[in-house]
Structure formats: C-alpha cells, structure tokens
Image: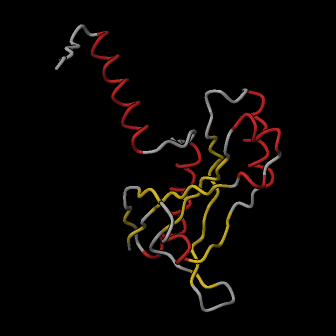
Amino acid sequence: MYIKPRVIVVDETQYWDARLVEGAGRIFGVYLYDANRRVCCCELTASYELYALEPAIMNYDTCSEADRDEIHEAFGQYTEPVHYVHCYQVDDALTFPQPTQRCKKDDYDEAWEAIVEHYKCNSPYYTVLTPLEVAARQAVELMQELERAGQLVLLVG
C-alpha cells in the first residue's frame, strides 16, 4: 500500500480579523492529505481528509512578530485538526506532491500519523511563494554562497 502525501494551501483570509490581514496580506491554511485515501462522509461523493498543519502568511517578512504569533496561536486553537473536502474540489486546486511512502495495509494509521507529525514539526511552508519567487530566492542564495567562497563569476552580455 502506498501513501501519497500532498500539501494543499487554502486561502482563508476572509475568516481572519482585518487588523491581522492588514499586516499579513493574505493568510492561508496549509493542510496535508493522502491522495490515495478517499472517504465518504454520509454521502456518495468521496472526500479527502485534510490535516491542518499551520497557517502561512503572504507578507511573512513584513508582518510584525506579535501578529505572526497571534495568527499561529489562533490557527492552532480555532482550526479543526481534520477537514473533509470533496475530492473533486481538492483535485482541481494547486497541490504540492511530497515523496510517496510505502506501508503495510495494517500499519496505515500508524504510518500516516507519523507522516502528519513529521510535517507538523518540520514544515517548510512558513511563506507562500510562487515557483518563480522560490527559484529567484534560491538563485540569490546560491550567488551569495558562491560570492562568500570566492567562486562567483558573473557573465555580462
């Protein structure tokens, strides 16, 4: 049996206090689900179980530390640990695939719990960036590292 963890980022700005949104820009909920596990909640339409990981703040660098702390605390306090969302809604959204995990059918619950705990403790989703922004940040970091090592060579056309 394979577990296909996926991360989905949901815009939840509309549910937050305007004072916090002003500094944060937009606030997202970051959730983890198994794309191989579909459940039916008293209906025929299948749903995914979305496990809440943490909030993501669009303007993380400019948002005050007090506001960031308040957002993280409120997310943990008021967000249900598991949401059920129809599969077709999640499948149509932008998700971030994670490495597939293999486990025995009898060990699924324990394996999934360990994966969720791993993502809660080691989540890289503190800010929400487009792929271009991620690539740009990585390029800048690489250039800084090469410059420190004295190996930076810039080609000017």
Q: Residue 53, how many percent across, how many down?
A: 62, 52
Depth check: 37 or 68 in front? 68
Of 11 and 148, which appears nearest the observer?
11
Residue in front for this viewpoint, 17 or 149: 17
- Residue 131: x %, y % from top left: 40, 45
Is 98 left, or right, of 109 in this rendering? left
Residue pictured at 50% horizontal, 42% vertical: 129
Check the image and name the residue furthest to the front.
157
Image quadrant holding the C terminus, namely: top left
From the viewer's perspective, is residue 154 above or below residue 29?
A: above
User: How many numbered circles are shown?
Assistant: 0
Q: Is residue 63 left or right of residue 38?
A: right
Q: Residue at x 79, y 46 (%)?
A: 74
Which x, y percent locates residue 7?
51, 57
Query: What color scheme is it?
Result: secondary structure
66 to 146, vertically: above or below: below
Q: Is residue 112 left or right of residue 12?
A: left
Please identify the quarter of the rendering in which residue 73 is found. top right
Could you tell me which quadrant the N terminus lies in? Answer: bottom left
**Measured from the top left, where is residue 86 in percent x and y?**
59, 77
